[in-house]
Image: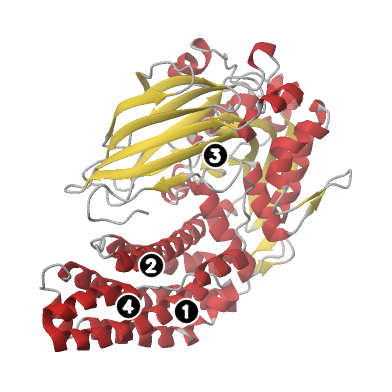
């Protein structure tokens, strides 16, 4: 289960393999149509093959474009007209008189209508959304992005942000229309439709991540003033709601597009400066109720599900330190080993003082597991700091359009999985950061509903690397489309043998709990929605109790999971009537990119799973 680096080659290969086999499916429809009306059927059959040829050619060209690099995208203006020609022809045929007639027929009518919808939407994407996106990339590729060796020229980025957001909105809208088409009942068409959904949604996620990053880059890079952020390096191998134990804290100072990464200090340097400010509810849930009694010192500052609370706690400690006293804190950036691994994949390997080479494949595992097996305990936090410092320093150096594009899409994706989050104390600045999805928070949007599931390890250990989580989401009523069933599984993959032989620093320093995962789990309902029928299967489990945490309703539960065992939570979720997107899960980050979430086909005929 190593994290796959998101290399473009990987995507490219993955997409090209499945070019739409879709109208073999239309053929099935047409066999039925043939029986129904002889000659009409024969003609429909011929046309269906043409639609299939145009559409699959268009989608394969689109897929190649999607996995292309920035410089390719900048010249995509040349291939767009060719793709548009294909989608237009497919659309024209599928909306001819014959098809409109067939769309009214029983049995096949719905599927014909879906094919018509597919051709319209894909044509819209190629005709309206993509040209806007390609224009932005073209303008950027002609601009001077780098400013000296470690600076970034902010002007072109600021200029691109608005048009990119517009292109993104139009694109998301089209993909949503595609997702809302009626799921075809004929197997082969359904396969085609689902394949299209997979490809389009992957592309939509990428464009969205890029658009979000562009919104916040100028701010992050100190447009107009100097700002210092605390970079909190956290390890999900010891889970805390927002990530994990804070191993070291560095400084990131930005001014007019240049970024300076200051020293990373191990958490020990902060311990004598006291605990972070926190609410009474947090004190009750994480300290009073135990079983692990949090001290809220620097190590525990990711225990808050909201990045904003971590920022307030961090600032309260920062202001007491000799180095913090002189330098007001503009905000915080929280990063985990997977984020550092993605930076290293983009910017090149990092070599440690002892010669160990960290790459875009092994960094997360090294920092979350190997380091605790091979190095003395007192060196691990400092090593984390060295890697964080080198990786972050390379982030904005030698900037080019290609690097900007890769970094932008990566930051957006990592923020979705909480591997990278940030918060700024300046209200106006924070508004933009939050709108772009870079501030971790408990479910807060009625239109984009999510369930929050946050884990905090109660066994002082580095068990998190061995804890795998999986979620299955299924829509269960499709009339008003607002009810879902969720199964959430937490599995302890450590073996009995490993529990006996691994260092206690990993398995836990209390003999009675060696190798045991001891999870305090908080469940938050979607904003404007609710959770019901929360049940647990397996493992010694506390009954979930409903509670209010800082004004938000949540369920709280505690489970102990022995090596090789698992516990599954099942519950129903009702989302707000305003929901306009499928339910997602916002959860404590894991050590790999795959969040383990699977969408099962809806329990009823319509709607596509995402």
Circle 4 — which element?
A: helix
Q: Earlier in the sequence, mark 4 or mark 3?
A: 4
Q: Quadrant of residue 186?
A: bottom left
Residue 478 seen in the current view: yes
Q: Which residue is mark 2?
A: 196
- Foreground residue among 44 and 146: 44
Quarter of the image with the C terminus is bottom left
Spatial CA span between label 2 and label 3:
29 Å
- Foreground residue among 493 and 447: 493
Tell me the crowding category of disc 4: few under 14, some 14 to 19, or many 20 or more residues within 10 angstroms, Cα based: many
**Does residue 496 lie above or below 7 as drawn?**
above
Please identify, in this view, whether the residue under mark 4 or under mark 2 is nearer the observer.
2
Please identify, in this view, whether the residue under mark 4 or under mark 1 is nearer the observer.
1
Q: Which residue is mark 3?
A: 589
Q: Earlier in the sequence, mark 4 or mark 1?
A: 1
Circle 1 — which element?
A: helix
Q: Which residue is mark 4?
A: 123
Tell me the crowding category of disc 2: few under 14, some 14 to 19, or many 20 or more residues within 10 angstroms, Cα based: many
Circle 3 — which element?
A: loop
- Foreground residue among 310 and 321: 310
Q: Which residue is mark 1?
A: 61
Circle 2 — which element?
A: helix
Spatial CA span between label 4 and label 1:
13 Å
């Amino acid at each position: 289960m190593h994290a796959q680096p998101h290399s473009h080659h990987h995507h490219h290969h993955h997409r090209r393999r499945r070019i739409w086999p879709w109208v073999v499916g239309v053929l099935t429809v047409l066999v039925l149509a043939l029986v129904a009306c002889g000659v009409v059927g024969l003609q429909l059959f011929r046309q269906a093959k043409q639609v299939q040829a145009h559409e699959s050619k268009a989608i394969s060209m689109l897929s190649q474009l999607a996995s292309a690099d920035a410089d390719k995208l900048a010249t995509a203006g040349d291939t767009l007209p060719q793709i548009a020609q294909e989608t237009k022809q497919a659309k024209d045929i599928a909306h001819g008189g014959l098809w409109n007639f067939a769309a009214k027929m029983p049995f096949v009518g719905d599927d014909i209508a879906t094919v018509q919808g597919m051709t319209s939407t894909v044509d819209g994407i190629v005709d309206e959304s993509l040209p806007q996106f390609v224009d932005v990339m073209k303008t950027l590729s002609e601009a001077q992005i780098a400013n000296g060796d470690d600076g970034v020229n902010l002007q072109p980025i600021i200029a691109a942000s608005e048009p990119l957001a517009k292109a993104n909105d139009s694109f998301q809208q089209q993909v949503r229309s595609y997702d809302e088409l009626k799921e075809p009942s004929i197997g082969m068409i359904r396969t085609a439709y689902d394949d299209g959904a997979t490809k389009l949604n992957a592309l939509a996620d990428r464009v969205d991540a890029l658009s979000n990053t562009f919104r916040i880059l100028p701010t992050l890079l100190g447009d107009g003033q100097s700002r210092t952020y605390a970079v909190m390096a956290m390890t999900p191998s010891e889970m805390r709601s927002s990530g994990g134990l804070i191993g070291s804290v560095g400084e990131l100072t930005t001014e007019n597009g240049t970024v300076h990464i200051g020293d990373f200090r191990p958490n020990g340097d902060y311990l004598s400066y006291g605990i972070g400010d926190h609410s009474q509810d947090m004190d009750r849930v994480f300290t009073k109720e135990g079983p692990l009694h949090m001290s809220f010192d620097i190590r525990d500052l990711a225990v808050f599900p909201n990045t904003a609370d971590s920022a307030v706690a961090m600032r309260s400690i920062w202001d007491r330190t000799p180095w913090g006293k002189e330098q007001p804190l503009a905000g915080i950036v929280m990063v985990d080993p997977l984020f550092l691994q993605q930076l290293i994949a983009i910017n090149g390997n990092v070599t440690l003082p002892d010669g160990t080479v960290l790459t875009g494949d092994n960094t997360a595992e090294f920092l979350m597991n190997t380091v605790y097996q091979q190095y003395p305990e007192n060196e691990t936090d400092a090593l984390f700091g060295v890697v964080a410092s080198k990786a972050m320093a390379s982030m904005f150096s030698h900037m080019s359009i290609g690097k900007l594009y890769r970094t932008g899409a990566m930051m957006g994706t990592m923020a979705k999985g909480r591997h990278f989050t940030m918060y700024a104390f300046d209200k106006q600045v924070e508004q933009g950061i939050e709108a772009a999805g870079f501030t971790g928070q408990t479910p807060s949007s009625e239109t984009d509903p999510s369930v929050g599931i946050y884990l905090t390890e109660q066994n002082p250990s580095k068990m998190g690397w061995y804890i795998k989580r999986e979620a299955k989401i299924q829509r269960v009523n499709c009339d008003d489309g607002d009810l879902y069933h969720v199964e959430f599984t937490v599995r302890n993959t450590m073996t009995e043998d490993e529990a006996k032989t691994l260092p206690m620093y990993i398995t836990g320093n209390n003999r009675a709990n060696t190798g045991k995962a001891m999870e305090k789990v908080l469940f938050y309902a979607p904003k404007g929605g609710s959770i019901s029928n929360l049940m647990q299967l397996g493992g010694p489990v506390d009954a979930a109790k409903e509670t209010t945490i800082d004004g938000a309703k949540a369920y709280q539960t505690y489970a102990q999971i022995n090596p090789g065992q698992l516990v599954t939570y099942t519950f129903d979720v009702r989302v707000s009537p305003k929901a306009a997107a499928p339910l997602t899960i916002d959860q404590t980050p894991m050590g790999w990119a795959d969040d383990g979430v699977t969408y099962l086909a809806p329990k009823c005929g319509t709607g596509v799973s995402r």
